[in-house]
Image: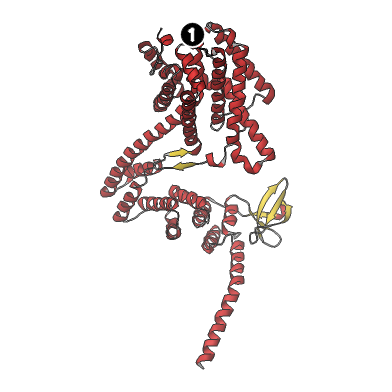
Amino acid sequence: MKTISTFVGSLLLLLTLTLSGPVAAQGFDELVTDLSAKSFNAKIKAVEKVAETGDDRAAAVLRAMLEGRLFERKEDGKVFITTREGRAYVLTDPLTLKEVGQVKSSTLKKIKVNNRLRGVLNGALGSLTLLSKDPVKRASAAEAVFKNRSADDIPALEKAMERETDAGVKAKMEMALAAIQLTADSPEEIKIAAVDVLTGHPTPEVRALLGGVVQSEQVESVAKAAAEALSDIERRLAFFNAIGNVFQGLSLGSVLLLAAVGLAITFGVMGVINMAHGELVMLGAYTTFMVQEVFRAYFPGAFDWSVIVAIPLAFGVSGLFGIAIERGVIRYLYGRPLETLLATWGLSLILQQLVRSLFGPTNRDVGSPSWMSGSVEVTGGLVLTYNRMWIIFFSLLVLGLLLLVIRKTAFGLQMRAVTQNRQMAGSMGIRTGYVDALTFGLGAGIAGVAGVALSQIDNVSPNLGQAYIIDSFMVVVFGGVGNLWGTLVGAFSLGIINKFLEPFAGTVLAKILVLIAIILFIQKRPRGLFALKGRAVEA
């Protein structure tokens, strides 16, 4: 008898498991149908039950209801997700999430939603998204719960926290739960514990929340704890803000360094005020655009390599243009700085018009490779973007390679000789004209490389170089004409000073103040921070 009873029990269990699938599917179908109930209270109950199923289809159905895309077919009462195309409505079956045809609007009845139901839908969608397989969606859901701060979300939030494996997402969930507990009608000890949790998350959102609690909280101990936490968070945010300004200043300084280092070579060695330097930067940016167009058309799978390929090509294109400018125009104007300035300014206009004729006057789309896209959030709202970090690294790499060329090659030796004493270098057999051409080409090539970097953070247009030419001259003069270390210090110093002044004075006024400061500095130290030494220079 015992064996028979065991067999019967096993058979019943097997039968139950076999039938559970169809019953669950049928139940979800009925719940979706209940969403079209006439009473809003009935709709709210149906929404809650649909969310409780945790079904993968639930989010799509509830989102469509919230967006006003959930309709009931008049003839049989069946519910569909719809998409309007012209005068017709494309129907999607909520059970299969597949298109099942299209109908006229007259055959459908929209499932209406009021403000109370919208709140329930938002909470239900937040709960469903908290359990999503995608960590980005879970993080977004946690942020949404933090903003809504509805006590109804606590069970779903606690359930999601138990399952969460991503430390960053779990921290957002803890912050959301603490925010709800602090603003809800919770016991005193729970509110104080919530304040302690929020203190570990120094963000502007938490600061705003604690500021409101300090003003409105009736319990003295909770208000005091919130005030202390607020003070601590404000100090930490100020510290992180300063770090952010330093990072932004370094990134701006790296851009100025790339734009100015080529100018430092030509200006320092040759004494040529090259007003077309910005257009050489622009040529490098457009070379990057052309390379990317080729990769998009013929090698789309290797697009991430397009920037790497563009670097030597931009150097070559701008370098050849630079040599052509020196050989064709500038060599006839040595010793006549005003005429050189006017001639190069005219060349800048010609190059701008050439680019407008070839590519048009509008901005061109230059994409970033995957390894330069995105950012990392450190803490306290401090976000470091990958493209800026790469440009800082790239600018230092370019400067390091340039120093190697100048100090470790025969050409670099000749360049330094011409810089220190042109007449003596010529009398020793150095072809100063040859050095001038190659030096100008080197400076122009580095300007082209700067264009590659600038294409990742700025609009690529015929006017790209104009935004950096004045700043480049300021960096060169401030650091010391022809001195690369001075250019490095000058670029980063001006970049950081600008970023610290901008919050108080604005972008334009900050630049004006920096320009005035440089003018006053040059009055006291005409050769800049690091002056070149040599008989000709000192003379």
SS category of the residue bearing label 1:
helix
In the rendered image, the vertical position of residue 60 relative to residue 17, given as above or below: above
Side (left or right) of 325 relative to 103: left
User: Which of the two residues, 327 or 193, is positioned nearer the viewer here?
Assistant: 327
Q: Quadrant of residue 356?
A: top right
Q: How far from the left and from the top, in percent, is residue 466?
A: 55, 20
Q: Is any atom of residue 470 visible in this view?
A: no
Q: Is any atom of residue 244 visible in this view?
A: yes
Mark 1 belongs to which amino acid?
Gln
Side (left or right) of 85 relative to 231: right
Q: Residue furthest front?
A: 428
Q: How far from the left and from the top, in percent, is residue 166?
A: 45, 54
Q: Quadrant of residue 311?
A: top right
Residue placed under numbered mark 1 in the picture:
423
In the rendered image, the vertical position of residue 139 relative to residue 316, given as above or below: below
Residue depicted at 29% across the width and 54% down the height: 188
Q: Quadrant of residue 481?
A: top left
User: Which of the two residues, 531 or 429, is positioned nearer the viewer here?
Assistant: 429
Q: How far from the left and from the top, in percent, is residue 114?
A: 55, 51
The number of numbered discs placed on residues in the rendered structure image is: 1
In the rendered image, the vertical position of residue 154 relative to residue 458, given as above or below: below
Residue depicted at 52% across the width and 91% down the height: 3
Label 1: few (<14), some or many (≥20) within 10 Å? few
Q: How far from the left and from the top, in percent, is residue 66?
A: 57, 51
In the rendered image, the vertical position of residue 397 relative to residue 301, given as above or below: above
